[in-house]
Image (cartoon, rainbow, N blue to C red):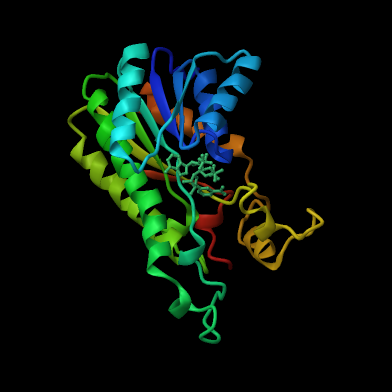
Amino acid sequence: MKLSLDNQVAVVTGAAGVLCSSLAKSLLECGAKVVLLGRTASKVENLAKKFADEGLTQTLAIGADVLDKQSLINAKKKINDTWGAVSILVNGAGGNSPGATSPQEVMDSKEGSFFEMDLDGFDQVMKLNYNGTLLPCMVFGEDMLDCQNASIINISSMSAISPLTKVAGYSSSKAAINNFTQWLAVHFSKKGIRVNAIAPGFFVSEQNRFLLYEEDGKTLTPRGNKIIKATPMEQFGNPEDLNGALAFLCSPQARFITGIVLPIDGGFSAYSGV
Ligand SMILES: NC(=O)c1ccc[n+]([C@@H]2O[C@H](COP(=O)([O-])OP(=O)(O)OC[C@H]3O[C@@H](n4cnc5c(N)ncnc54)[C@H](OP(=O)(O)O)[C@@H]3O)[C@@H](O)[C@H]2O)c1
């Protein structure tokens, strides 16, 4: 069975990111027309050029902020004028904030503990991960009411299922994404819009490489080591490992699947450690 997304118009937010550029490419390879949406226009424009060099030309690069509803409305108008209605939305823009992170895993002393975290950090990470998913669903979801097989894919995380130490704000915000995914799936259930999430395990990116590997780039840090020990497959994921799940969840073959959060994690979330 070949998964085809021919004639679908997909928006990928945060498209220039490590995981989302791979997801965007996979949608193109499945036949979708793909809007590469990102905060910095030059980054998504460069990505579109890179894809074109690889023969993938059905892209539209748009600079827009997922926290600015008007900029999303402007993006939607441009997409509708160019390609018509959006039928797939991948809410990829997301990330962490240092202010919502505690250097200490388990509190030892007051310094570097929960008491030194700041509300602004929590606000930032909640806004980016939660509002930054909510607003694109509001804006692009309207288009989907007129589509046949419409699909929203949110990006969750392992820290949504059981919080990772240190990243308090990020974990709460991703737990909120799981809850919202279920809520919206039910809300849209009679309107032909399916809402699911994928929960990536641990993937090496420029942002987290220093947390996982020592300066030599080969030796695992203590945290990297812990993760590998807690991952039955004993490896980090490659961005491409997410692509099959995304294509499947967006395809008509998944027409009866809505409201799920699919872990793609080498067994991390299944393993108790014993
Ligand atoms: N990497 C992992 O191991 C991992 C694991 C689990 C879950 N995730 C989740 O997967 C998603 C993608 O992660 P990633 O590693 O690919 O992220 P990334 O490489 O850090 O890229 C994030 C992208 O989001 C864009 N962005 C940030 N704020 C934005 C805004 N307000 N409006 C529009 N775009 C914005 C950034 O654009 P600019 O550069 O222009 O700011 C960037 O291109 C995130 O939700 C992340 O939390 C990642």
Q: Is residue 254 above or below residue 172?
A: above
Q: Is residue 224 above or below residue 191?
A: below
- In which image quadrant can residue 8 be found? top left
Of the pair 137 and 270, the residue shown nearer to us: 137
Q: Is residue 1 visible?
A: no
Q: Is residue 254 visible?
A: yes
In the rendering, at what x and y percent does residue 243 appear?
Answer: 54, 32
In the rendering, at what x and y percent does residue 52 appear?
Answer: 60, 16
Q: Is residue 237 above or below residue 32?
A: below
In the rendering, at what x and y percent does residue 176 appear?
Answer: 33, 55
Q: Is residue 231 left or right of residue 184?
A: right
Tally of numbered tags? 0
Of the pair 44 and 55, the residue shown nearer to us: 44
Tell me the quadrant of the picture where the C terminus can be found.
bottom right
In this view, the residue farthest toward the right is 216
Residue depicted at x 65% and y 60%: 211
Q: Is residue 147 left or right of residue 27?
A: left
Of the pair 67 and 231, the residue shown nearer to us: 67
Residue depicted at x 55% and y 30%: 42
Residue depicted at x 37% and y 40%: 66
In the rendering, at what x and y percent does residue 209 appear?
Answer: 67, 53
- In which image quadrant can residue 70 be found? top left
Q: Is residue 255 above or below residue 7?
A: below
Residue depicted at x 47% and y 32%: 246
